[in-house]
Image (tube, helix red, strand yellow):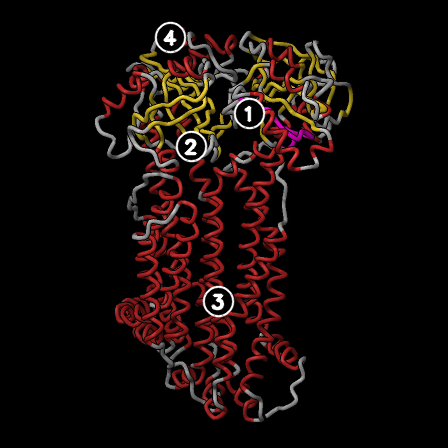
Amino acid sequence: MLSKFPVILPFSLALRNMRTRLWRTALTMLGIVLGVAVVLAIQITNDSTLESIRQVFDRAAGRANLLVVAEGSGAGSTNAFNEEIWEEAEGVESIEVAAPTIRTQTILASEAGRTSFDFTITGVSSGSIIQLYGIDPELDPEVRVYELASGRLPNPEDYETVLPEEYAEENHLGIGDDLVIVTPLGEAHLEITGLLTKEGVALINDGNIAFAPLEVIQELFEREGELDEIGLRISPETAENPRQLEALKDNLEAELDGEAEVIYPSARGELVPMMLSTYQQGLAFFSLIAVFVGAFLIYNTFSMTVVERTREIGMLRAIGMSRGQIIRMVMAEAGILAALGSGVGLLVGILLSRGLIQLMGGVIAAGGETVITLPLAGVLQSLLVGVGVTLGAAFLPAYSASRTSPLEALRARSRSGQGVRSGVWIAGLFFMVGGFLAIYQVPWRQEVVFGAGSTALLAILLGATLTVPLVVTALEKFTRPISKLIYNSEGSLGSSNVRRSVGRTTLTVAALMVALTMVIGIGSLAYSFEQDITQWIDTALGGDLYVRAPVPLRESFGRQLASVPGVEALTSARYISVQLVEAGSSGSSENLTYNAIEPETYRQVGDIEFSTGQGDSENNWQRLAEGGAIFISNSVADRYNLEQGDEVLLKTRRGERAFEVAAEIVDFTGQGLVVIGTYDDLHRWFADSGVDRFTLSVSPGYSVEAVAEVIEERFADRNHLTAQTTEIFKEKIRDLMRRSFRLFDVLNLIAVIIGALGVINTLTMNVIERHREIGGLRSLGMTKSQVLRMVLAESMAMGMIGGVYGLAFGWAIAQALILGMNLLNGYELEYIFTAWPFILGLLIAFLVSQVAALVPARGAAGVNIVEAIKHE
C-alpha cells in the first residue's frame, strides 16, 4: 500500500488527467456551467424583477414612514378619501410632515386618438399614458426626492408643472413651454417651470410623469375635496422605534374610523409580486429540471473517465494504492471541475439573466428601470448546486473505480456488459407510483401545494429515469427493424449495441427523456392554456369594437356612440379596486378588481363563461341584475373557498357590505382576481361612476373599420378617445400568453443541449470500450462508412427509445402541470391534446441523436486497424 500519500498528489494526478483529456474536461465543465448558470439566472431574474417593482413604490413613497390611503386602494384604484383627513393628520404630535397627493392619468393632447394599450401578466397597462401627481409643492419635497436639473417647482396655486428632463426632450418641450393635457373638461395648459434629473420621483412610471399643484389637478379632474394618499414623515424618535411606529399607526387608524387606512410604504408593492409568484415558482422548478438533467451528464462523464483509465487505475492498485486513495483521486478531479465550472457558471448566469430579464420585461411592466440584483443567497445556492451535484454525481464512478480489482483492470476485456440491478427499476416504480399518488390523491394545503407538487414531479422523473433499463430492454427489439431499414444491416448491429451498456445507456436515454418530457409538457400546457384563454376572450370579450379614452368617459356618452350609423348595440364597463374582507381574519383584507357592467346591455354584445356546476345561466344573470350580488372568478372562489350562494364582504364607501355570490365564472383579468357587479351597486355602494371601456357590436353590412373611423372622426378631437377592433385587443392578449412561455422555452432548450451532450458522451465511451472490436470488424472488411452507420444507428436507437418514453411521460406530466396550475391559481383548465409538441419531441429526439453522434461516429470510422487490434 502507498502509505505516504501527499495531500496534493490527488490534485496533481487529476490535473494531469484533465490536461490529457481536454475535450472531456470541457464537456464536463459545460454541464456544470449550464446547471449553475440556469439556477443563478433564475434567482437573479426573480429578485431583480421584484426589486424593480418595489423600487417603483419606494420612489412614489419617498421618505414617508407611513401612508394614509383610501380603504380598498391598490394598484389601479380609483378610491379616494376626504381631504379633511389631511388636516387631522397634521395635528398629530409625532407627525412632522403630512404631504397630500392626488394621482390621475392623462395623455398629451398631441397624442390624443393614438392611445396604445399594452398587456402584462398583471393586467392591462396603458402604453402612452402619463401619470399626473397633484402635490403640495412646499410639503412634498419633504417626503419625496426632487432633483431639479433646471428651473423651479410650481407655485402652489398656479397652472404650472415639473416633469423629467428626458421626457421633455422626447416630446420637444422645455421650460416656459406648455404641457397640453387631456382632462374630463377638455384640454388644459400647464406651464413647465422645471425639469427633473433622472433621480427620485423622475423614475416613477419609467419617467412618464408630471407634478402639478394639488388644487389645480383637483379642479381639472373634478376631484375637489378628494385625496388619494397622504405621505407621513414621522419624528426620528418614533420612526426609529418599531413598536412606537406600530402604535402610532394603530392609533391613526382608530381615529380615522374606517374613513381611510394607514399602511407602511412597502405594502404598496406587495400586490404585483403576489400576482407573479406562481410564474416565478414555475421558473424555479424548471431550473431544477436543468440541474437534474445536468447531473446525468456529469455522472456519465466521470464514468467515462473511469472506463478510459481502467488500466491506469489497475496499475495504481497493483503498486499499492488503496481504494480510499483511488476515491480521493477521482473526487479531487471532481472538486477542481466543480470549482472551475461553478465559477464560470456564475459569470454565464449573470449574462443569461440579462436575456431572461429582457424576456420578463415583455411579460410584466414594472414602470421603471430594471435593476440587476445579485442576491448573495442565490450565489451561494448556485455554488452549492454546482459543487454538490458534481461531487455527488462523481462519487458513484469513484466508488466503482475503487472496487475494481487490479487483475480485472489489467485485462484487455471490456466491462460494458455490466447490467443494472433489479432493485434499481423496482425503486423507480416505487418513486413513480408515489409521485402520482401524491399529486392526484393527497389533498395538499394551499401553502404547500407548490413545494409538494414540485417534489412529486421530481420523484416521478427520478422514477422514470430508474425504470429506463426496463424500457430499453422492451423497446430495443422494435428499434432494430427501423434502424435496419435506414442503415441496412449495420443498423441492426448498431441498435443491438444499446443493450451492451445498459447502465450507461440508461442515463443517456433518461437525459433525452426528461428533456423531451418538459418540451412536450410545456408545449401541451401552453396549448391548453391558449385554447382556454381563446374560449374566454371569444365569450367574455365580445363585440366588434372597444372605445377607450385616457380618462374615464361619462356614462351618458354611450347615447352619442349609439347614434353612430352601424352601431347595433353597446355596453359599458368600469374597473375599480376593492377590498375583500376575509371571514375570521380580524378585519384583514386583500385587493380585488371590481368590474361594473350593465347586465342587460352586456349580453347584447358578449357573454360570460360560467364555471361548471353553476346551475341555470338565466337565473344567475337575473340574480346579478337584482343587485347586492356579484359574479366571482374561479380564482377568487378557490383562493377564499367560496361557492355559489355564499356571501362576500367588500369594503365600500358606506362601510363593509355583504354581496351574495350569484355564480362562479371563468375570468383571467389580472390573473383572475376579479369580481363582476352592476353599475347600480357601483353608484350606490362605491360612490363611483364613469366608463373605462365601451364595447360595441357592429350591424351586419357595415365594416368594423369604417365604423371605428367614423367614431374617431366625430369624437376623437373632443373626447380624445380611441376605437380599437376587438380582434387587435384579443391578439395582444394571445401574444402576452405566448411571451409568457418564452422563458420556459429557453430552459427547455438548455435541457435539450445537456441531453445532446449526454449522447456524445455515451457514444464516445462506447467507441473507446469497443476500440478493439471495431478494429476487428474493420479487419474483416467493414468499411469506414459502415462503421459510421453502425454508430449512428446505435445513437438513433437511443434517441427513439428516449423519444417514445418522453412522449408518454410528456403526456402524463402535461396533465400534472395543468392540475398544478389549477390548484395554485384556481383555474379550471382542461387538457387539450395537440399533436405539435409530440411531433416536435420526435424531431428533437431524432435530430439530437444523429447530430450529436457525428463526432464519435467519425472517430470510430477513423480507427487504425492494427492499433485497434493491439489495443489493451
> Which marked residue is nearer to the observer: mark 3 or mark 4?
3
Instruction: Tell me the distance, in whole angstroms, between the alpha carbons under discs 3 and 1.
Output: 56 Å
Labels 4 and 1 touching (C-beta < 8 A): no
Which element type, helix, strand or loop, lies under badge 1? strand
Q: Quarter of the image containing the N terminus?
A: bottom right
Mark with earlier residue (2, 3): 3
Q: Label 4 amino acid?
A: Val
Q: Is 216 left or right of 559, judged from the image as shown?
A: right
Dot 4 corresponds to which residue? Answer: 564
Instruction: Tell me the distance, in whole angstroms, between the alpha carbons under discs 3 and 4.
Output: 67 Å
Mark with earlier residue (3, 4): 3
Mark with earlier residue (3, 1): 1
Dot 1 corresponds to which residue? Answer: 261
Q: Give the numbered dot on residue 247.
A: none
Dot 2 corresponds to which residue? Answer: 582
Rate crowding at label 1 as few (under 14), some (14 to 19) or many (20 or more) other CA atoms within 10 Å.
many
Which residue lies most toward the left here? 616
For the residue pair 807 and 241, the one nearer the viewer reads as 241
Q: Give the numbered dot on residue 297.
A: 3
Labels 2 and 3 touching (C-beta < 8 A): no
The reply to whether the magenta stretch includes residue 128 is: no
Q: Label 3 amino acid?
A: Leu
The reply to whether the magenta stretch includes residue 64 is: yes
Q: Is 764 left or right of 88, judged from the image as shown?
A: left
Q: Label 1 amino acid?
A: Glu
> Which marked residue is nearer to the observer: mark 3 or mark 1?
1
Which element type, helix, strand or loop, lies under badge 3? helix
Q: Quarter of the image holding residue 693?
A: top left
Labels 4 and 2 touching (C-beta < 8 A): no
User: What percent of the width, then of the height, locates residue 470?
Assistant: 30, 70
Residues in magenta, as a range: 56-70
User: What percent of the width, then of the height, locates residue 825?
Assistant: 39, 40
